[in-house]
Image (tube, rainbow, N blue to C red):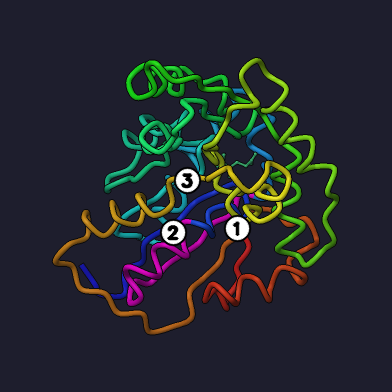
Amino acid sequence: MNPTDPILLFDSGVGGLTVLSEVRKLMPQAPVIYVADYAALPYGEKSEAQIAARVPALLGRLEERYHPRLVTIACNTASTIALAAVREALGLPVVGTVPAIKPAAAMTKTGAIGLLGTAATIRQAYVDNLEAEFAQGKLLLRHAAPGLVAAAEAKLRGEPLDPAVFAAAAEGLRSQPGGENIDTVVLACTHFPLLEAELGEALGRNVQFVDGAAGIARRIEFLTQGQEFSRENPDLAVFTGSNGSLVKLRPALSSYGLDRIEHL
Ligand code: DGL
């Protein structure tokens, strides 16, 4: 293996940058290729069949083109639907993203946990299984908040945000039976930690948030233990399609060390 071989982080959009910042903390020397599948954003509004058909094939193409040493699906929607198929399709280690229900169950004092994700994520059996395994005896209330994906994208482009989006997400949890007791919220979409301040205001200060980013970074570090890394060039951001907003996104990408952009 070459020390310049990258770690590839994959998401539908900018959400995976929340994982990238945790990777940077643990592994500052690791070269990274960040891939945003803008041609198919948002994943959360797609069907299982669409995600299952798209993600393994696209990651296969990316593996051939960029020869990463490891792939991370920094997206809950893609992971909860297609992780097993991606692992089968690729010949290298694949790290997925799992809604942080286990740590949330350990953190809650009231026993009431909220979960914000995409529509596609919150209906997955994968989430039912995590709930059954780790949140027994707790109340787990799920809410799909697709508006937050668009808001996170807008925030990174430096655009103004509409507070009504955060109020609606908070209301979607609080209005469910038992929702008034929620003290811990799982951010089960990698876009959402980008909006923690806004969500904190909407939900009230007593609510704590939990997401999987730091755990994913630790997993990547573990799987690459003993490997040499050398980050010789600015890291690369790759976009499928283009929604015409990449110019506005450049400063944010740059703050994550992504100073080269390619289109696929
Ligand atoms: N960032 C993705 C996730 O973690 C999904 C955003 C989308 O809907 O594309 O679920």
Type of residue at label 1?
Leu
Nearest to N terminus: mark 2 or mark 1: 2
- Whether 20 is among the magenta residues is yes
Query: Separation of disc 3 and disc 1 at Cα?
Result: 29 Å
Q: Residue at x 17, y 62 (%)?
A: 225
Which amino acid type corresponds to the residue marked 3 in the rendered image?
A: Asp
Dot 2 alpha-carbon crowd within 10 angstroms: few under 14, some 14 to 19, many 20 or more: few
Which label number is shown at residue 264?
Answer: 1
Q: CA distance from mark 2 to mark 3?
A: 30 Å
Q: Give the mark, 3 or 1, whose residue is nearer the N terminus.
A: 3
Closer to the observer: label 2 or label 3?
Answer: 3
Q: Is residue 138 above or below residue 85?
A: above
Q: Residue drawn at (57%, 62%), measured in percent from left and top?
A: 238
Q: On the rendered structure, is 178 left or right of 68? A: right
> Is 163 located above or below residue 246 in the figure?
above
Q: Give the residue drawn at x 70%, y 34%.
A: 145
Residue 241 vs residue 176, the one in the foreground = 176
Ligand 1: give its quadrant. top right
Q: Does the residue at mark 3 contact the one at mark 1 (Cβ under 8 Å)? A: no
Ligand 1 within 8 Å of disc 1? The answer is: no
Disc 2 + disc 1, Cβ < 8 Å: yes
Q: Position of residue 115 (x, y in %)?
A: 56, 31
Q: Is mark 3 within 8 Å of ligand 1?
A: no
Is 160 situated above or below 74? below
Identify the residue position indicated by label 2 in the image. Answer: 65
Indicate the position of residue 82 as horizontal and vertical percent values. 45, 31
Q: Is residue 124 left or right of residue 152?
A: left
Quadrant assignment, res 117: top right
- Horizontally, residue 72 falls left or right of residue 236, namely left
Q: Nearer the viewer, residue 91 or 168?
A: 168
SS at mark 3? loop
Q: Which mark is residue 211?
A: 3
